[in-house]
Each structure stands twice: as C-alpha cells, then as structure tokens.
Amino acid sequence: MKITRVQTLIPVLALSCTSVVAEVQQVREGAFHTQSVVLVNASPSAAWRALVRIPAWWDSAHTWSGSSRNLRLEPRAGGCFCEKLADGGSVEHARVVFARPGLTLRLNGALGPLQEMPVTGVLTFTLAPDGPGTRITMTYHVAGTMSMASDKLAPAVDQVMAGQFERLRDYINKTAN
C-alpha cells in the first residue's frame, strides 16, 4: 500500500487540534505495549501539576471505591498511586519509580483487572514542550502470564487508558491556563 503525504499528516493534524492519538503499538504472547499522545494548551510545569492531581481527572468508573476522590498520587520515587476504600481497606494501583517534575512520571503497577494476573505494568507519562503547549506521551507496557490472549486484552486496556488520557487532556486544557 502506498502512503500519501496526506496520510502522513493525519497524526500531526490530529495532535494540532488536541485530539488523543492512541494505539496498541505491539502485541506478542504474554505482552503488549500501548501508546497515546496529545498536545495540550499548557506549559510542561502546568501540565505536570495537573497530571499529579489524579483525583481531579481519573474516571470514577475505573476505581474500586466508585469515586476518584478516594485516589492519591505521591509524585516521588516510592510514592503510591493508591485508593482508600469505604470499609477501611485500600488498594495500591501502582508505585512511582521515576518522577522528574515537568518531564517524566513512571509508575510500576498492573491496573484494574490486570492486578489479579501475574503481570507487570510500566506506565510512563513523558512531557515535552511543543510550540506554546506541551506534548504528553503516555505508554503502558504490560508483560506476564495473562488470563486471556494478549491480542484480545490489549485493545480493551488501550481503550480504557485512552479514555483516562482524554480526561487528563480535558482537565489540563480547562485548568492550566
């Protein structure tokens, strides 16, 4: 198939209008890699401040407690992306392994239903200046023994993560200016 110049510009045009470009980058047995990219109307430092306010943008439908207000994120190495439960319980969604304000946030954890599987997930947010705004790239690498085929699981995880990323984009664009 021949790729035209218009086809190569589609991702660039999509980013210029702050759409989320999300895709499953790689799938193999027991592993997959997703990536989402967006351009937001904020500086890297403002985008970072919004990113780490996870209760403000995470979808409550994707929490164990039913409310994103019960989430917390400690943006430092060893920090917890955790959730408190009504009965006094708690959930560790991920552990921060790298935090460089305005540049990179990396967490290690199997999110949602992946938590019940013997898998490892590495979720990375990379922020870079891009014109008057910031380009944010979110990658999620998951590997291990999965309870279903990777090629079936990856699109579902990508869809949920892209939805979260859209909420982050909207929150940044609404509050960072």
Image (cartoon, grey):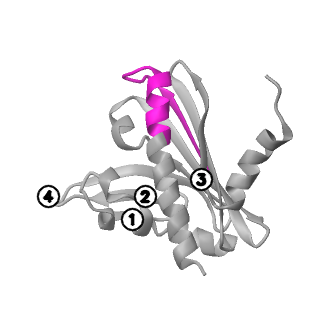
- Give the Cα distance between marks 1 and 4: 17 Å
Question: Can residue 78 be seen by looking at this rendering?
Answer: no
> Along the polypeptide, which appears first: circle 3 or circle 2?
3
Identity of the amino acid at label 4? Asp
- Give the Cα distance between marks 2 and 1: 7 Å
| Residue interval drawn in magenta | 138-158
Identity of the amino acid at label 3? Val
> Along the polypeptide, which appears first: circle 3 or circle 1?
3
Please state which of the two labelled residues, at mark 2 or mark 1, is closer to the viewer. Answer: 1
Magenta span contains residue 148: yes
Disc 4 target residue: 87
| Outermost residue to the left | 87
Element at label 2: strand
> Along the polypeptide, which appears first: circle 2 or circle 4?
2
Disc 3 target residue: 20
- Give the Cα distance between marks 3 and 2: 26 Å
- Give the Cα distance between marks 3 and 1: 24 Å
Q: Quadrant of residue 152?
A: top left
At label 1, counting other C-alpha atoms closer than 10 Å, the crowd grade (few under 14, some 14-19, many 20 or more) is some
Identity of the amino acid at label 1? Arg
> Along the polypeptide, which appears first: circle 3 or circle 4?
3
Question: Can residue 68 be seen by looking at this rendering?
Answer: yes
Q: Is residue 154 left or right of residue 26?
A: left
Identity of the amino acid at label 2? Cys
Please state which of the two labelled residues, at mark 3 or mark 2, is closer to the viewer. Answer: 3
Q: Position of residue 95 (x, y in %)?
A: 47, 52
Disc 1 target residue: 72
Please state which of the two labelled residues, at mark 3 or mark 4, is closer to the viewer. Answer: 3
Q: Is residue 121 left or right of residue 134?
A: left
Disc 2 target residue: 80
